[in-house]
Amino acid sequence: MIRRPSLVLAFALLGAACTPAAPPPATSPPTVPASATPDQGSPAAGSLTVYSGRSEELVGPLVERFEAATGIDAQVRYADTAELAALLLEEGTNTPADVFFAQDAGALGAVAAEGMLSELPQPLLERVPAEFRSPSGEWVGVSGRARVVAYDSRELSADEMPASIDAFTDPEWRGLIGWAPTNGSFQSFVTAYRLLEGEEAARAWLEGIQANEPRSFDSNSAIVQAIADGEIEVGFVNHYYLLRFLAEQGDDFPVRNHFFEGADPGALVNVAGAGILAATDVQPAAQEFVDFLLAEEAQAYFATETYEYPLVSGMAGPEGQPPLESIEAPDIDLSDLSDLQGTLELLRSVGALE
């Protein structure tokens, strides 16, 4: 059974371990300009403060569109999602943040568990399927990220790919696997595996992968590039990393995504999402921001610019990928992915992390 962690410690550890994802080519994480640092005083009318775990490179243009559409000045603090979650838990009711825009549902669940998020309006929540929002209505997913195995299409065909993530513990994959144990999305997958299959099964899977001598990378982008370079044949990533390469290099890029079926743990669909801080005194502006993220313009942006899955019904997903509703993801409350401390401890105990 998963223990309830000390949340501040969990996210402090995670923040030290995780590398924020960025599309190729690799770039340095954006810095926070002084003008974007939240004002510690009372927020001005027509403005709000957003803590964003999505990078400025990815969502900065979307924030600008929100400001243009609403006239609301959005002051954004960009940082790693785990670091911002830890900061929110430390600040408590004194936080200057009005909205938490997180890359990971587990971080939203952790902040909500401390009573720091307010309940969102039901009509807003209902624009997104129940599995992609808080059961208690305190956060809502705005884009989806599917776990896949990227593979070298020169060496493997779709028919040769295993039916389960568990199959990669077979010795036939020795020396052919790439993974990123420091990556937050991978750690969320391991947390989900622990919830779905239990602690011992998760340990056995990690030990089996370790026995196959996987190559460790700092990012998912590096894994996909290593597959294209012929250094490995498969890698555990999110679906959209390949799509960024295909957009830049065309269909001749020799890597493809494999989606698991049958609610396999390897088919986890996590979300980026948003919640409104209970301590905000600009509730209408904060609600407008969340509403904008679920509006057609923003949902289309996620599909075409970040290659994620829109979560509002009726919106087309990224080109060339299976529809979101066809992905046979495991049944899991994404809020429960908050026990990242236990996952970090497990990864260290099997030697995947130092």
Image (cartoon, helix red, strand yellow):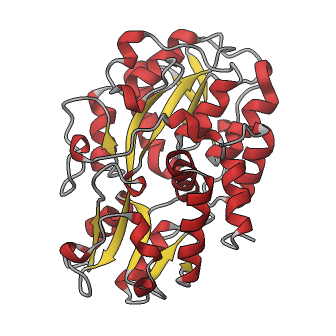
Observer-nearest residue: 346 or 218? 346
Q: Is residue 42 left or right of residue 297?
A: right
Q: Position of residue 285 (x, y in %)?
A: 52, 15
The image quarter containing residue 260 is bottom left
Q: Which image quarter holds the N terminus? A: top right
Residue at 47% across, 75% down: 169
How many labels were placed on the picture? 0
Q: Is residue 116 left or right of residue 206?
A: right
Q: Position of residue 308 (x, y in %)?
A: 34, 48
The image quarter containing residue 293 is top left
Residue at 23% across, 77% down: 160
Residue at 59% across, 14% down: 118
Observer-nearest residue: 139 or 248? 139
Observer-nearest residue: 276 or 167? 167
Q: Is residue 79 left or right of residue 152?
A: right
When the figure is inspected, residue 327 is found, relative to residue 289, above or below; the finding is below
Q: Is residue 183 visible?
A: no
The image quarter containing residue 50 is top right
Q: Position of residue 90 (x, y in %)?
A: 81, 32
Q: Position of residue 224 (x, y in %)?
A: 40, 74
Residue at 24% across, 80% down: 153
Q: Is residue 2 visible?
A: yes
Q: Which image quarter holds the C terminus? A: bottom right
Q: Is residue 113 left or right of residue 10?
A: left
